[in-house]
Image (cartoon, helix red, strand yellow):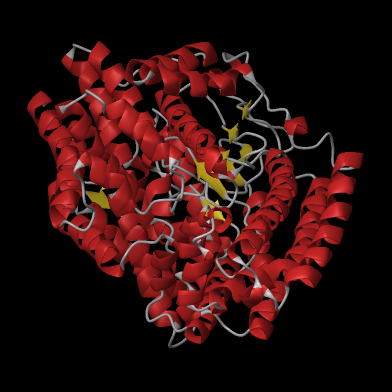
């Protein structure tokens, strides 16, 4: 996913961090992208037969950012950054209206440089932390860097606040100068928040208190999850390892792991409920002060997508539940010889599924070949991640679970974190994260302030990369058995990405609405969770017992409220985009790469127009959902 650690009210822009797991967005089951954002492996990591057979997995080298946490370059940047931020504040604070367009353009360029340095420091600290969440020294370093950069960014806070107070006519005059005109898309985006901006004093207070408020509760969630251990088969497993067993080929192992996850979460549910309630109340207070009408409205504005477009997406997906998820899980239950499946069998492999271990070299070549068949230029950019030490692939003690792509800063390059275990879904995760990485590399040309892509478009390249890889793999299969296995895996991935994520957004909406009236008990949170999951997944899945606690470890609810619908947006967008590609290959790759290079300079209407697509058109969502329905149709024909 793309996790922004900044706001449009002047907090340091660390750009975006993409976190996923094996084959679907952050959710409640092991093969859905982003099983957790901050969970550690045990002191003595367990290994299975797949891990033992995988060799040659790359580990990243973070020295392209800084040589080490105690290095002179890092100390120099921190000291120079603090000095330059003070000088910037003294030079420009209170003087923006009197600046010429050229002078304001120069100020914006200096501001961008300062923010990029903050981004480099926090990218390094974040990646160090993700590499070993269990090391208290690294945790202390990460927290210290957050506090140091937060103090520096407080000195810069005035700039965007004062930019937003400029009158539109005066700003337009200044924008006639090319030095400032370059930043027009960035100015457009920050000024979209003008109606919700508070006084400078309140903005500064919220900014400074964030580390001792919301960020502290998020850290409590992360560290609580990281410390949990789940007993399965006499071993104490991490969350990632336990959830991975929910896709094991043995039903008894799936059952034991699922019950263990639920029981351990249940024992900690009061803590998780307190965190969720506190952060929901925190959001309600800030939303009220900023005059956002609905809990989801601030996320929509941050995504630069209209409320009615998101409402249309949610309505279209919820209307599709019977045709998609309900129908598929009935079909899967029939394959397993049952009328109803227990929740731990939702992502179970099909009885005939091949558990062959895929080597790292084969995974690399599979993904790059699929990229190359679409565009040699895209494959060339993707190949740089393997040529350099930009990927961290092994499972190891203390490492964050799941996977992500972090773009760092334009003056460096992105890094990918994977937990590669040799399954087909791990190959698809590589295709997904590499898509993000290619997107980030291409968008770097826009500079630090304008390389960011809104969340609704951030998943485009990743999901498109997955689709290219899946289609390439599927084209190799002619036998009905293998095609059924591959199609079923893809359908489950798409349901996890679309249906499940809209269900998550519905859960969040209900929780945040009720929290406006009173605190929700752990029992009430579980009731809402079960009701929403039953509605979305249908009667062929039996959801009860300890499954009521499974909402509690989903990090998106804590880190980025209402983030999740962006996955459904991206998947439906890519489905529609791929349909255009299938209809006419000529010139498509060039237009597609041009879209990625635009970064955050264009909105979704402008980006999609060259492909004849419009997300405001209800038919857009129907077209994307029809792709999933078509795959299910083929599965029914295969029997």
Residue, x 32% and y 65% (percent of image)?
Answer: 506
Residue, x 51% and y 61% (percent of image)?
Answer: 560
Q: Nearer the viewer, residue 19 or 291?
A: 291
Q: Residue furthest left?
A: 637
Residue, x 46% and y 50% (percent of image)?
Answer: 600
Up the image or down, 6 lies above or below 80; here it is below
Residue 304, can we see it? yes
On the image, the x and y values in percent for residue 348 come to 34, 35
Q: Nearer the viewer, residue 431 or 484?
A: 431
On the image, the x and y values in percent for residue 264 come to 56, 55
Up the image or down, 271 lies above or below 563; here it is below
621 sits to left or right of 115: left
On the image, the x and y values in percent for residue 269 come to 55, 66
184 sits to left or right of 94: left
Give the quadrant of residue 445. Answer: top right
Residue, x 35% and y 17% (percent of image)?
Answer: 354
Give the quadrant of residue 149. Answer: bottom right
Q: How many marks?
A: 0
Q: Nearer the viewer, residue 46 or 82?
A: 82
On the image, the x and y values in percent for residue 584 come to 17, 26
Residue 520, can we see it? no
Q: Nearer the viewer, residue 50 or 85?
A: 85
Quadrant in the picture for the C terminus:
top left
Up the image or down, 285 lies above or below 454; here it is below
């Amino acid at each position: 996913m793309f996790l922004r650690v900044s706001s449009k009210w002047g907090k340091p822009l660390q750009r975006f961090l993409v976190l996923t797991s094996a084959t679907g967005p952050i959710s409640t089951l092991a093969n859905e992208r982003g099983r957790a954002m901050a969970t550690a492996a045990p002191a003595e990591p367990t290994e299975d037969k797949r891990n033992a057979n995988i060799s040659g997995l790359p580990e990243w080298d973070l020295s392209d950012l800084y040589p080490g946490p105690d290095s002179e370059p890092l100390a120099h940047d921190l000291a120079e950054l603090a000095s330059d931020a003070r000088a910037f504040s003294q030079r420009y604070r209170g003087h923006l209206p009197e600046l010429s367009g050229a002078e304001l353009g120069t100020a914006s360029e200096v501001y961008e440089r300062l923010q990029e340095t903050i981004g480099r420091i926090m990218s390094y600290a974040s990646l160090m932390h993700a590499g070993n969440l269990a090391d208290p020294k690294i945790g202390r370093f990460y927290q210290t860097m957050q506090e140091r950069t937060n103090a520096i960014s407080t000195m810069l806070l005035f700039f965007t606040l004062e930019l937003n107070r400029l009158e539109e006519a005066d700003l337009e005059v200044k924008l006639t100068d090319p030095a400032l005109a370059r930043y027009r898309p960035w100015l457009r985006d920050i000024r979209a928040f003008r109606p919700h901006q508070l006084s400078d004093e309140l903005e500064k207070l919220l900014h400074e208190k964030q580390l001792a408020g919301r960020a502290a509760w998020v850290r409590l969630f992360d560290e609580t999850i990281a410390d949990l251990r789940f007993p399965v088969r006499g071993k104490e497993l991490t969350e990632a390892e336990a959830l991975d067993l929910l896709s094991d080929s043995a039903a008894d192992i799936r059952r034991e792991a699922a019950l263990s996850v639920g029981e351990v979460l249940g024992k900690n549910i009061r803590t998780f409920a307190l965190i969720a309630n506190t952060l929901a109340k925190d959001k309600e207070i800030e939303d009220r002060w900023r005059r956002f009408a609905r809990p989801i409205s601030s996320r929509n504005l941050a995504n630069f997508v209209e409320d009615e477009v998101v409402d249309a997406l949610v309505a279209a997906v919820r209307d599709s539940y019977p045709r998609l998820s309900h129908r598929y899980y009935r079909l899967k239950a029939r394959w397993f010889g049952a009328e109803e499946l227990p929740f731990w069998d939702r992502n179970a492999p099909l009885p005939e599924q091949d558990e062959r271990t895929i080597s790292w070299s084969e995974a690399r070549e599979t993904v790059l070949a699929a990229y190359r068949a679409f565009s040699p230029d895209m494959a060339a950019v993707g190949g740089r991640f393997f040529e350099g030490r930009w990927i961290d692939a092994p499972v190891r003690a203390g490492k964050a679970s799941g996977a992500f792509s972090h773009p760092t800063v334009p003056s460096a390059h992105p890094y990918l974190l994977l937990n590669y275990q040799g399954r087909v879904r791990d190959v698809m995760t590589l295709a997904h994260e590499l898509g993000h990485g290619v997107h980030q590399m291409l968008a770097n040309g826009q500079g630090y302030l304008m390389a960011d892509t809104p969340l609704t478009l951030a998943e485009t390249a990743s999901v498109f990369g997955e689709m290219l890889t899946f289609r390439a793999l599927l084209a190799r299969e002619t036998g009905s058995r293998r095609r059924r296995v591959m199609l079923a895996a893809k359908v489950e991935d798409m349901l996890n990405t679309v249906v499940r994520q809209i269900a998550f957004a519905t859960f969040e909406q209900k929780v945040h609405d009720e929290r406006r009236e009173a605190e929700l008990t752990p029992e009430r949170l579980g009731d809402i969770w079960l009701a929403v999951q039953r509605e979305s997944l249908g009667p062929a899945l039996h959801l009860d017992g300890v499954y009521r606690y499974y909402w509690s470890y989903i990090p998106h609810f804590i880190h980025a409220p209402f983030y999740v619908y962006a996955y459904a947006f991206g998947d439906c967008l890519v489905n529609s985009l791929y349909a255009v590609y299938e209809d006419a290959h000529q010139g498509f790759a060039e237009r597609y790469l041009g879209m990625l290079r635009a970064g955050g300079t264009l909105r979704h209407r402008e980006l999609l127009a060259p492909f004849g697509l419009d997300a405001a058109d209800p038919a857009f969502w129907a077209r994307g959902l029809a792709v999933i329905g078509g795959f299910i149709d083929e599965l029914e024909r295969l029997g």
